[in-house]
Image (tube, rainbow, N blue to C red):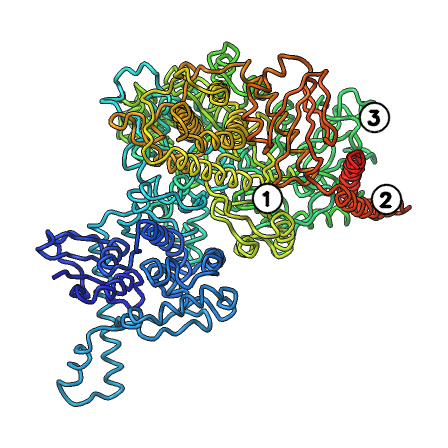
């Protein structure tokens, strides 16, 4: 007898599915056990069905597998193959589409996972969307398949059981009338009632109290409790129930812990939640559905559900695939590219999606070309970003700062966070289909990469390329750290603006220019200067004027007096001053302004630092001492007014530097830091490009490259953080009176080492003392994240150690990234690669454009135009988009502005487009410019293209037939028809264009070629043309042979067309390719992603003559169709007389007459020479300069009736145009009506006028027939 192991929990819908399925086979119902299967069974999860000895002790694990077996015993899986396929399809729908989103909505209510309002709101909207699809499908049906209940109903009903119990309120059920009717019917079937009992539908969505026993558990359990003694009191029962509940929770926790250790984890994406669940049935679609018929329509979720795990499992993404060793010589060559490592804190945005779409297309193309291919993944530790995230988490959860924890404990907290959350972006990259070798994934803080970073620093420091210096840096007072230029947002202001600043209750004023006067020492004269940062005047040490300014020549050698301290400041003459700006005199604050710093260096001025690391004033007189910098701004202004030295305040357009991480205002601050001397390295990087050793594509970026490299400044690599690579450098104190103490900024007193012992020995040698006299203090700072990123192309392969990967894959082939990090990352990789390995890290750099919205605006949260690619893939409602804003850090005013932006751009939300459509759209947009204006509607257009592709392959497979066997090789047999030769010519042209496009990084060229081939050449022309060939296939042997040749041609187009498309749309092409028969089943690759990419040498059938003839034929067909549409000939076939200019054209028409007749729905095609008369009663149109189309209408239509209809239409159009003209002629029209509406009105008028002309022309033609 079979044994069914199920869960005890009353809401375990998987176990309930198996139990209900078991009710369909009462005669052979298995024994039910509510505990884990024994270890000997080796089952992964419940439900599990162990079949008896008579059936070979087979073990079925997973709800769907168990339910299918049990239902099939009770004849509930469909009466024939067609019904079984439909049941299978609904089973997949329940498992892949309903279950994940149901869990995402219900599990937070049940306390299974934490509550996240944003995610739950989005999940609920997605659930309603899926149920509306189901609602539509159930409109004409009582049950999902056939006229009685089947496993399809059981599977889908149990998948929606929890939503109906806990989520779907009466208002929701009112919308889902068909689903509610069907669900109620299901749960009242005897099989459901026996297992579920009475189901109470949800009245209001609230948290679900915990439950202790499954409905339908053996009654004996309850009886035993009461028969073994006197009845228990209510208080006793409550106490026992509580005890039982605790024990069960403890038991469940132990079970879960045990399972985690033994079970393999399969990743399943539940909207924006990543849960790890044991799910053997995930591969159901993959293993079984490719042998069942294609579903009626394309569904991205269905297609994209299971291919990626299979690709990964098969090892297709590894360079070792198909070869014994990576060191083995490959005649096709090697392709290696490393990913621009995304931040470990990051989540996917459209910039990532664009980068990965392009990189994956290139990787897949090279892999299909047979090259040893590696696309190496990795993640950046993102020093500042990660530290900020963990600090916020600490403060929110424990009310502690990192200083409360201490450095070591804080770093442990960061590692803990990284291990829990840090691989989220990897899962998102997998969702995009990125074919990365995940076994080689690297994290910049891994021991291997950390060792490389340490080695790079020590080598460069020992060589003197890295040195210590005190200079101005970008300082964030909130982070207490220097930050790089890329982490500084430049906020443009048009005038006076109040901005929020961390640590200040009130907003701070920016965008004003304050003028004040300095008194000239020894006279009544004054010099007026102006500044946007009035508080910095406390650190002024000079006033500068231009050497040629006649107004100030008399002040040479003079001093001005500081109003708040006993400081005399020289008037210096410097060419950097603009005589025409303001008064021509400029205050100089060398310690707090980059330009002033250089003036201070040139004139040997005093550098007075007036700010500490927290933004408090130091080295200033009372009352300003200790003030916060922006409070001092007000105080200084008032003090100047009190002294009569204030002149004016006026609006001033300016750029304010804002820290992208902390939103603090960035301050230039003098700090001792570590710097990289970039002079020589920059020259080498520039020379590599000038000499052609490194190619930058597109070449309009060369100007930027040379501008940066030729004028490069030294690079500050110190960061005052705890998370990151701690600088392996030590400050030396020599315990010997003969050696004077050193200063922090003096590089002579700093030594680097791989260990403290090594550093101590170096120090002792430098100062010629014994080791015991050396004391060391390691630098507290960490290295700039870009330092570790700069050595990423070789550190991932184990440099400085000689490894097999380093020898094979370094230097790489290509670096692909956005042009916005050309300097921050690309230049530094080139410099450090040359410096540390003597080799360029890659041969080519391809820079893609930056993604903007459909209006050309930069993506910004406050505009509401930042789009998560996963929202484009799965779809999201407008309410879901709004909910994302509510959970952001925007202030209420910005939220409202962003909501309006979303409402304007996505009034109905974003429809589900799927990964393939998103990838194709991003590649299609990648013109080699600087910006991409992304319109989501265009992505939806490519979703429809996928559907067209799907239907085309469905039709083709039906036309090929079940017994079709493709020839072993794609080649011409000599029996091809003119249509066959033309489509094979177009296929060959597409192969050549795609090959050239990939080599030139011309992604729009590739997408246009493939799109046109499938949509306009294969689908529109050929498919209609093959119908008559196949319909006549059985008439005689010639027709049979022609049909066979036509089938071979059709197969070649499908198979090659899918291979051309595969790098861009990997999921749908794999799904469709798996349905096609193979040319050589025993030796052909198992996946399209490792099948050879079509090559021009093999597909060399391009014929310009055939193309020219068919282009003419298609223009004739288009003209005939247009005429038929003009005269409303929807079903009626008419004779068509084609008047040709010469005998050669007549010959072409005769040659292609069958194609013209079929594709234009004509009765007959009659070619005429220029001298032959055309019968009366024809509508006329010019197809080309070689041919005029004459469509016979006489006797086919009621002329008077058609004229009457056209007269009515003409009247309507005239009224419409008159009304528009009247509106547009009003005197205040241009002032009052928005420009967008004016453009719409002009377009409407143009369309109406064009339509009116066509109507008049048609009426004239009809009258000629009267």
Q: Which quadrant, please, contains the C terminus?
A: top right
583 relative position to 331: left or right: right
Q: Secondary structure at mark 3?
A: helix
Q: Mark 1: few, some, or many residues within 10 Å (few <14, many ≥20)?
A: few
Q: Nearer the viewer, residue 390 or 545?
A: 390
Please say if the residues under marks 1 and 2 sit with CB atoms less than 8 Å apart: no
Mark before the other along the chain sequence, 3 or 2: 3
Residue that numbered label 1 is attached to = 860
Q: Relative to residue 1134, is residue 425 depicted above or below?
A: below
What is the number of the mark on residue 1101? none
Mark before the other along the chain sequence, 1 or 2: 1
The Cα–Cα distance between marks 1 and 2, rounded to whole angstroms, is 40 Å
Residue that numbered label 2 is attached to = 1221
Q: Mark 2: few, some, or many residues within 10 Å (few <14, many ≥20)?
A: some
Q: Relative to residue 402, is residue 994 depicted above or below?
A: above
Q: Nearer the viewer, residue 513 or 606?
A: 513
Residue at the extreme left of the image, as rendered: 53
């Amino acid at each position: 007898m079979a044994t069914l192991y199920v869960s005890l929990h009353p809401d375990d819908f998987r176990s309930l599915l198996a139990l209900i399925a078991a009710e369909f086979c009462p005669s052979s119902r298995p024994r039910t056990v509510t505990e884990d299967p024994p270890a000997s069974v080796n089952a992964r999860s419940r439900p599990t069905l162990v079949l008896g000895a008579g059936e070979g002790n087979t073990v079925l694990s997973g709800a769907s597998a168990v339910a299918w077996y049990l239902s099939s015993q009770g004849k509930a899986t469909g009466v024939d193959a067609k019904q079984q396929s439909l049941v299978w399809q609904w089973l997949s729908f329940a498992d892949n589409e309903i279950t994940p989103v149901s869990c995402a909505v219900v599990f937070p209510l049940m306390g299974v996972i934490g509550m996240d309002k944003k995610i739950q709101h989005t999940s609920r909207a997605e659930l309603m969307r899926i149920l509306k699809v189901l609602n539509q499908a159930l409109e004409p049906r009582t049950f999902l398949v056939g006229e009685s209940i089947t496993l399809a109903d059981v599977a889908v009903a149990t998948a929606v059981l929890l939503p109906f119990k806990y989520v779907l309120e009466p208002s929701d059920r009112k919308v889902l009338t068909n689903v509610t009717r069907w669900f109620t019917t299901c749960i009242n079937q005897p099989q459901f009632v026996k297992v579920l009992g009475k189901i109470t539908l949800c009245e209001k969505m609230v948290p679900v109290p915990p439950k202790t026993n499954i409905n339908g558990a053996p009654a004996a359990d309850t009886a035993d409790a009461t028969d073994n003694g006197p009845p228990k009191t209510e208080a006793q029962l409550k106490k026992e129930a509580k005890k039982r509940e605790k024990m069960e929770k403890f038991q469940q926790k132990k079970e879960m812990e045990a399972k985690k250790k033994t079970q393999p984890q399969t990743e399943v994406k539940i909207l924006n939640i990543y849960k790890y669940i044991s799910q053997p049935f995930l591969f159901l679609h993959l293993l079984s559905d490719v042998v069942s018929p294609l579903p009626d329509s394309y569904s991205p979720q269905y297609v994209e559900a299971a291919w990626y795990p299979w690709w990964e499992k098969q090892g297709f993404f590894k360079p070792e695939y198909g070869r014994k060793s990576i060191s083995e010589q490959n005649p096709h060559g090697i392709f290696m590219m490393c990913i621009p490592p995304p931040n470990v804190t990051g989540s996917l945005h459209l910039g990532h999606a664009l980068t990965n779409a392009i990189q994956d297309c290139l990787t897949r193309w090279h892999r299909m070309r047979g090259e040893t291919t590696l696309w190496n993944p990795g993640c950046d530790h993102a020093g500042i970003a990660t530290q900020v995230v963990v600090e916020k988490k600490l403060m929110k959860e424990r009310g502690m700062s990192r200083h409360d924890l201490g450095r070591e404990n804080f770093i442990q907290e960061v590692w803990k966070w990284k291990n829990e959350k840090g691989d989220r972006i990897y899962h998102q990259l997998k969702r995009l289909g990125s074919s990365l070798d995940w076994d080689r994934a690297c994290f910049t803080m891994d021991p291997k990469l950390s060792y490389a970073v340490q080695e790079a620093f020590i080598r460069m420091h020992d060589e003197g390329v890295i040195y210590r210096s005190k200079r101005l840096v970008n300082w964030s007072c909130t982070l207490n750290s220097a930050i790089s230029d890329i982490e500084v947002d430049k906020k443009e202001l048009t005038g006076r603006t109040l901005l929020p600043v961390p640590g200040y209750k009130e907003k701070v004023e920016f965008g004003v220019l304050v003028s004040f006067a300095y008194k000239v020492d020894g006279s009544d004269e004054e010099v007026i200067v102006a500044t946007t940062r009035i508080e910095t005047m406390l650190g002024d040490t000079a006033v500068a004027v231009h050497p040629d300014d006649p107004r100030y020549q008399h002040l040479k050698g003079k001093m001005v007096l500081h109003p708040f301290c006993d400081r005399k400041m020289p008037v210096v003459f410097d060419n950097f001053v603009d005589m025409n700006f303001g008064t021509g005199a400029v205050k100089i604050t060398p310690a707090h302004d980059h330009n002033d710093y250089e003036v201070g260096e040139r004139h040997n001025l005093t550098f007075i630092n007036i700010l500490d690391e927290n933004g408090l004033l130091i080295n200033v007189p009372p009352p300003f001492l200790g003030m916060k910098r922006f409070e001092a701004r007000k105080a200084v202004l008032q003090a100047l007014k009190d002294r009569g030295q204030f002149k004016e305040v006026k609006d001033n357009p300016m750029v304010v530097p804002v820290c992208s991480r902390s939103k603090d205002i960035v301050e230039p601050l003098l700090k001792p830091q570590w710097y990289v001397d970039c002079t020589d390295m920059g020259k080498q990087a520039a020379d590599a490009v000038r000499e052609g050793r490194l190619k930058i594509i597109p070449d309009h970026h060369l100007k930027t490259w040379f501008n940066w490299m030729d004028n490069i400044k030294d690079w500050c690599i110190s960061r005052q953080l705890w998370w990151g690579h701690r600088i392996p450098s030590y400050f030396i104190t020599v315990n010997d009176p003969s050696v004077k103490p050193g200063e922090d900024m003096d590089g002579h007193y700093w030594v680097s080492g791989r260990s403290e012992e090594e550093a101590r020995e170096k120090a002792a040698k430098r100062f010629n003392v014994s080791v015991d006299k050396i004391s060391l203090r390691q630098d507290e700072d960490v290295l700039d994240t870009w330092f570790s990123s700069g050595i990423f192309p070789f550190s991932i392969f184990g440099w400085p150690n000689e490894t097999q990967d380093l020898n094979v894959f370094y230097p790489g082939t290509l670096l692909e990234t956005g042009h916005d990090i050309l300097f921050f990352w690309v230049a530094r990789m080139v410099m450090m690669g040359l410096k540390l390995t003597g080799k360029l890290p890659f041969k080519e750099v391809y820079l893609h454009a930056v993604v903007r919205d459909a209006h050309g605006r930069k993506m910004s949260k406050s505009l509401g135009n930042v789009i998560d690619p996963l929202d484009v893939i799965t779809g999201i409602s407008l309410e879901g988009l709004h909910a994302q804003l509510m959970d952001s850090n925007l202030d209420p005013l910005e939220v409202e502005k962003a909501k309006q932006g979303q409402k304007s751009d996505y009034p109905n939300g974003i429809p589900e487009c799927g990964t393939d459509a998103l990838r194709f759209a991003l590649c299609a947009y990648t013109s080699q410019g600087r910006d991409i204006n992304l319109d989501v509607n265009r992505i939806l257009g490519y979703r429809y293209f996928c559907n067209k592709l799907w239907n085309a392959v469905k039709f083709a497979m039906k036309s090929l037939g079940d017994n079709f066997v493709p020839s072993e090789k794609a080649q011409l047999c000599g029996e091809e028809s003119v249509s066959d030769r033309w489509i094979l010519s177009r296929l060959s042209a597409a192969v050549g264009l795609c090959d050239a496009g990939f080599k030139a990084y011309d992604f729009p060229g590739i997408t246009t070629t493939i799109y046109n081939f499938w949509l306009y050449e294969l689908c529109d022309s050929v498919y209609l043309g093959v119908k008559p060939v196949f319909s006549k296939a059985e008439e005689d042997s010639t027709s049979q042979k022609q049909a066979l040749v036509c089938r071979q041609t059709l197969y070649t187009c499908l198979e090659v067309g899918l291979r051309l498309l595969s790098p861009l749309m990997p999921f749908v092409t794999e799904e469709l390719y798996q349905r096609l028969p193979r040319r050589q089943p025993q030796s052909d690759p198992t996946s399209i992603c490792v099948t050879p990419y079509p090559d021009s040498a093999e597909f060399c059938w391009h014929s310009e003559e055939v193309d020219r003839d068919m282009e003419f034929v298609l223009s004739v067909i288009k003209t005939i169709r247009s005429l038929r549409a003009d005269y409303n000939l929807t079903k009626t076939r008419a004779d068509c007389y084609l008047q040709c200019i010469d005998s050669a054209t007549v010959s072409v028409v005769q040659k292609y007459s069958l194609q013209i007749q079929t594709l234009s729905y004509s009765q007959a095609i009659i070619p005429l020479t220029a001298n032959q008369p055309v019968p009366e009663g024809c509508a006329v149109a010019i197809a080309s300069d070689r041919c005029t189309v004459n469509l016979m209408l006489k006797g086919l239509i009621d002329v008077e009736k058609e004229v009457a209809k056209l007269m009515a239409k003409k009247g309507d159009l005239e009224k419409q145009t008159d009304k528009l003209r009247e509106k547009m002629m009003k005197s205040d029209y241009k002032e009052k009506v928005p420009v967008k509406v004016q453009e719409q009105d002009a377009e409407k008028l143009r369309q109406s006028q064009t339509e009116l002309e066509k109507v008049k022309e048609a009426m004239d033609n009809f009258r000629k027939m009267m």
